[in-house]
Image (spheres, rainbow, N blue to C red):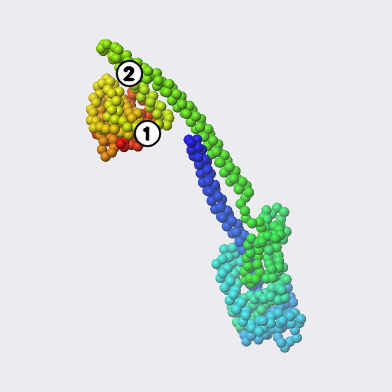
Amino acid sequence: MPQRKLLIILSLIVILPLIFLSWQSWKISRDNYQVNHARFKQLISAKLDTVDALVQTYFDETQLTLSLLIPQWTLDTNSIRQITNSNGTIRQIFVIDKNNKRLFPANNIPLSRNESALLQRLSAIWRDPQILFSNQSEQLLEEQTQAKTKSPSLSSQRIALKGMTKSLPNNVLQHGWYLWHWEGGANLIYWQQNNQQQIIGVELEPVRIKSDLISRLPNTVADSDQDDNFRLRVLDTAGQIIYQWGAFSPAKTQALQQHSLSYPLSSWSVEYYAKAYSPATLSRYSLLLTLAGFALLISALAWFLYREQTREMRLATQRVQFVSQVSHELKTPLTNIRLYAEMLEDLLDDDPQPQRYLQVITDESQRLSRLISNVLNFSRKPRLHKREFDINAVIQQSIAHFKPSFAAKSITLNLNLQAMGSLHSDPDALEQIINNLLSNAEKYAANGKQVDISSAIDQQQFTLKIRDYGKGIVRSERKRIFQPFYRINNQLTEGVSGTGIGLAIAKQQAELLGGSLELIAIDKGACFQLKLPL
């Protein structure tokens, strides 16, 4: 049973720290994963915002250029056609007056094929030119949203351009972008209103826009020494890839993040592809190796403690068995010595000298017998043999054993024995308790020169008090005197031999008999009180 308890304790010593360390490691690993994953997502968002900023910078520059050029144009048919033919960025130009009447391309002039196509593409505007202004409201709302969410990632160049486009010429009332889809493609118009409330719209060449945008984005072929394994894609409204770059091959993987581009290409999007974030393999293995090493270290320490403890327990068991065997072997010759000493005492004359010698032999043999009984009772499980016996007779028998030694040390015995009657208990255990208490008084309180012994029966309970008038026991030591092998280290025990098991055995025997043994607080000396049920 002790080995089983030791195994349980050592297992807990190993398992509990490992559980705690594993939980803490998991918590730290989880927190690090969440922090690093958030940083990873922030880095992706920053890259997508950078792409968006590059695209928007292009439109800001285009808007600034057109807003400065349009007021310089002569809005007659020949001038407009000349501008269209000479500028590769401009696909077509239209003009609408304040009454929503189309001034160019006009209905009363012959139109080129491109101008006729323009009329067909912009049929919605001809029906209701106010959709340009409603689109401008959407632009303002989106710019406000961008200011709250994406403004930190805009480059200083774009911010400067935004400031410049707000300072348009005085003859510009309103301006904006208009995006519509025609034949599966996206078409863009920049328009602005002059002080005559005329709307001048410039339809940009879609192919040129895509070409200019691609020229601003990073190279499609990644550098050979590029470490970033990712891919960025710019998609149009239909989900077709306009441009992509990066070394990572998406295959069937989903985009880690997808952002819509800012106005006017709100229907376009940019996607980021890469391997999903995962903790470094080396980091995981390092954590596992650390836990394994710690577990191995604790297990080795637990095994060493178990081996040492079991070795000590085996040695202690062997010692106890040896002491028990030796004590048992000594008990028989001691009994014979005491018996023959008593017989010799009856045969001797009244010569006091031999009588004194025999008394010393008898007393010492009795004391050694009590010591051996204590050792035997402590080294093995106590056994009780209860029967009816005379209480006072057992007390008197124990007192008789100590009278010679008390007389030799000039210790006076004051008896107040009121317990008359029988007790159903173990007389040998009761005698051993009394002997141990009297032995303590003889060894440690001889300077008090007095021992009081009183007994009584009250409310179906036997009570025995043994008090000495020695130096007593300090308050701090009173709870420890019943511990096995504990001896007070002060002047009380100085020069007095003892095993430190007498009071422990007395208390153990009292509890086995169903009673109690306590130290009562008194002014002088020590007083032990034994209580047993009748």
Coordinates of residue 526 in the picture (x, y in percent): 28, 31
User: In the image shown, does 69 or 389 lie closer to the viewer?
Assistant: 389
Quadrant placement of the C terminus: top left
At label 2, the amino acid type is Thr
Looking at the image, which residue is at 58% across and 71% down?
142
At label 1, the amino acid type is Gln
User: In the image shown, does 294 or 435 lie closer to the viewer?
Assistant: 435
Between marks 2 and 1, how big is the CA–CA gap?
A: 28 Å
Q: As drawn, which residue projects farthest toward the bottom?
A: 108
Secondary structure type for disc 1: helix
Can you say whether 352 is above or below 32 in the image? Answer: above
Residue annotated with mark 1 = 508
Q: Tag 2: Cα neighbours inside 10 Å, few (<14), some, or many (≥20)?
A: many
Coordinates of residue 465 in the picture (x, y in percent): 27, 32
- Seen in the image, is 194 located left or right of residue 414? right
Coordinates of residue 238 in the picture (x, y in percent): 69, 70
Coordinates of residue 164 in the picture (x, y in percent): 59, 70
Looking at the image, which residue is at 34% across and 19% down?
364
Can you say whether 383 is above or below 111 in the image? Answer: above
Observer able to see residue 144: yes
Residue annotated with mark 2 = 362
